[in-house]
Amino acid sequence: MNPDWLVPHWPAPAHVRAVCTTRLGGKSVAPYDSLNLGDHVGDHPLDVGVNRAILHQAIHARPVFLSQVHGADVVWLSEKTPHGTPADGCLTAQSGVACTIMVADCLPVLFTNVQGSLVAAAHAGWRGLAGVGGYGVLEAVVDEFRDKALVDKAQDASEIIAWLGPCIGPHAFEVGDDVRDAFAMHDPAALAMFAPADSGKWLANLNGLARLRLDALGVTEIYGNDGGQVWCTVSNPSRFFSFRRDGACGRMAATVWLE
């Protein structure tokens, strides 16, 4: 794999593999340079096809690219699941099928369990993370994870391991009252994840909000993005795509699979 890509440092079993691409190592030209994996952003389709083939060949598994709609729907993947399936989370117990999430500021979250029997991925932008009535994409993935693993929902989720990838950082994600209210109305602790911005709006800590949700679900084994600037998509233009920074840009992918 490209040495610039991010390989999670998490205590997953050896047969659970994961990686998050960066913008480097592909075919696309500016403003999608170079490893753009999104086929919906205006890039040349042939270049996107080459880039997706690069990822496929590098991981020796089939990445399934969803049609992400900033919601909370999740799907189970098989080797026959078509690209473009509408969902913002996906799970699989089949080897050789890679749960894949595309991002360019939103937070990708990868999952497995201590047994390595399942893997999952979630697209946690603020809308999907907030969800409806406090139930968002992370809750949906964890519920499916527990059901498939035959774990009683009343028990904790201590066997689930999560890794958070790069996203827009807490100093760069300016939002309005609507975003703050969407989280705070269901969890007052979420207020601590919003700091006043000079503009009169709020600076949101997307990574921190995700950690709050996972902690509430009983997921305590959380690795990856700690909110530092090295993880911020906006602050690292040579490495990460960022829609908030650039507008027209490519998409990176966080993917997890069973060998």
Image (cartoon, rainbow, N blue to C red):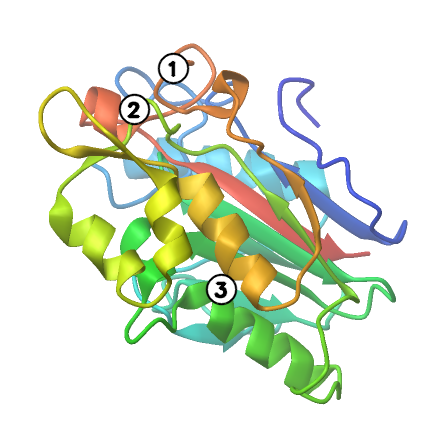
> Which quarter of the rendered picture does the C terminus lie within?
bottom right
Whether 236 is drawn above or below 85: the answer is above
Badge 1 vs badge 3, beta-carbon distance below 8 Å: no
- Image coordinates of residue 101 in percent, x first then y, are 47, 50
Residue nearer the viewer, 68 or 96: 68
The label on residue 214 is: none
Residue nearer the viewer, 164 or 102: 164
Q: Residues within 10 Å of mark 2 (few under 14, many from 20)?
A: some
The answer to whether residue 126 of the structure is visible from this angle is yes
The answer to whether residue 106 of the structure is visible from this angle is no
Residue beneath disc 1: 235
Q: Going by the picture, which residue comes out furthest to the top?
A: 238
- Image coordinates of residue 213 in percent, x first then y, are 49, 59
In the picture, measured across the screen, residue 160 lies left or right of residue 171, that is right
Q: Secondary structure at mark 3?
A: helix
Q: Earlier in the sequence, mark 2 or mark 1?
A: 2
- Image coordinates of residue 135 in percent, x first then y, are 38, 73
Residue beneath disc 2: 172
Badge 3 vs badge 2, beta-carbon distance below 8 Å: no
Badge 2 vs badge 1, beta-carbon distance below 8 Å: yes
Q: Secondary structure at mark 2?
A: loop
Q: Going 69% across and 18% down the picture, which residue do you hit?
A: 3
Residue beneath disc 3: 138
Q: Going 20% across and 50% down the picture, which residue do you hit?
A: 179
- Residue type indicated by callout 2: Ala
- Image coordinates of residue 88 in percent, x first then y, are 40, 62
Q: Earlier in the sequence, mark 3 or mark 2?
A: 3
Q: Going 37% across and 63% down the picture, which residue do you hit?
A: 187
Whether 36 is drawn above or below 16: the answer is above
- Residue type indicated by callout 1: Ser
State the separation of the CA atoms marked 2 and 1. Answer: 8 Å
Q: Residues within 10 Å of mark 1 (few under 14, many from 20)?
A: some
